[in-house]
Amino acid sequence: MKKPIHILQVVHSLVIGGTERVVCDLVRAFNNDEFCTSICCLDELGEFGEELRSKGYDVKVLGRRPGIDLNLVRRLRKVYRQQNVDLIHAHQYTPYFYAASASLFNGGTQVIFTEHGRHYPDRIRPKRAFFNQVLRFCTVSYTGVSEFTRQSLIRYEKMPASRIRVIYNGIQLDGNYNGCANPAIVRTSLGLKKTDLLILSVGRMDPVKDFETLIKAFSFIAQGLPHASLWIVGGGDSNYSEQLVRLIEELGMESKITLLGSRRDVSQLLFACDLFVLPSITEATSMTILEAMASGRAVVATQTGGNPEIVIHGQTGLLVPVGDVAALSQAMDQLLRGTSLREVMGKAGRSRIEKNFTMEHILLEYEELYREAVGMPDEKGALKQENLHR
């Protein structure tokens, strides 16, 4: 029997997040007769990592040291050899730097680099751009989760445009997002009344998410719509969370705005909300926007990064300028007052997900990429359906 192709996914960690969710989907899908997949976390395990381990998946944690950890290169190289790794898939730049550096001294094991997001503000780093030219020798392919991300790799990282493809994030349209949930029942279970209007926002606690603008914009909404409330979901920077709490108190919005912290029932919250809002300063391909659209919710988002590639302004939601309190408040007010418009946009968003952003479609693109990287014959569609839904 032919040995399966061993793919090693290299990540910062498997804490709860969009990138980490994509990696988990890849691991579950590419463990079959043709592929076996393991994971190497550079920093920490995380909740998703614990789940995968509990289900028997191979997840290693290397414990990266602060600064440039040259010993990490040696340890990665040891993992490659011990596990007979055929292909390395690194997610985000730091894991790519270490994974590709280790590959250079391991007989050139091929590396795929996927960029999930960009720092803000972005800029050219000359030393990094130089090292990227060296790492090209072991990098078989580059991918970005949006055209915005692809252009950033070309402009700021000086990576070869001809070898960068776009593979968007995707949503599994079964289980939580199969369209069968009853919003009224979900809302009742969360203590919401029929007349309540709920705005939901989901993202890590980080200034780049710009929840300050959302909170300020909502304070105007609350004046005209007394039954409206705002729930913000996400863990992360505790200092930033405290800053938001102080802002909420200054605006007198303690009874209207709730910071829920990290939650595992986001899919339920999405079905319960009336409107989803993401006010980020920058985004690549937001998993939470995709999830909101899969849940049939109209979206208000900032016109930045990859957002316009997902949200079609006036059809599946509304796009507003970054940091514009007045524009954000106006867009939310328009959709909260326009029940039929929200419903039309929500249905259009769900349809867009079904046509362009299903996990099945995205996994087939990764399957094709993996086959190309290791020189396997192109057998598009060979990924077994049972592996897509495990």
Image (spheres, rainbow, N blue to C red):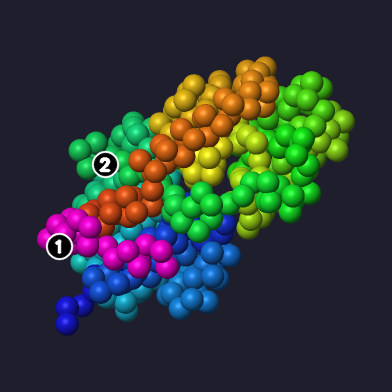
Relative depth, front residue between 147 and 267: 267
Magenta stretch contains residue 376? yes
**273 relative position to 81: left or right:** right
| Amino acid type at mark 2 | Ile
Q: Quadrant of the N terminus?
A: bottom left
In the displayed structure, 22 sits above or below 292; it is: below
Check disc 2 and report its element: helix, strand or loop.
Answer: strand
In magenta, the rendered stretch is 370-390
**263 relative position to 353: left or right:** right
The residue at the point 68 percent across, 23 percent down is 337
Check disc 1 and report its element: helix, strand or loop.
Answer: loop
* Of marks 2 and 1, the one in the foreground: 1
| Amino acid type at mark 1 | Met
Q: Position of residue 83 (x, y in %)?
A: 32, 77
**6 relative position to 288: left or right:** left
In the displayed structure, 1 sits above or below 98; it is: below
Q: Residues within 10 Å of mark 1 (few under 14, many from 20)?
A: few
The residue at the point 47 percent across, 25 percent down is 315
Relative depth, front residue between 275 and 95: 275
Q: Position of residue 325 (x, y in %)?
A: 67, 21
Which residue corresponds to mark 2? Answer: 164
Q: Position of residue 159 (x, y in %)?
A: 28, 40
Q: Position of residue 229 (x, y in %)?
A: 76, 35
The residue at the point 61 percent across, 36 percent down is 276
Which residue corresponds to mark 1? Answer: 376
The residue at the point 63 percent across, 34 percent down is 275
Q: How many marks?
A: 2
Q: Quadrant of residue 51?
A: bottom right
Q: Quadrant of the C terminus?
A: bottom left
**Label 2 or label 1, whichever comes before in sequence order:** 2
Magenta stretch contains residue 159? no
Q: Is residue 72 in view?
A: no
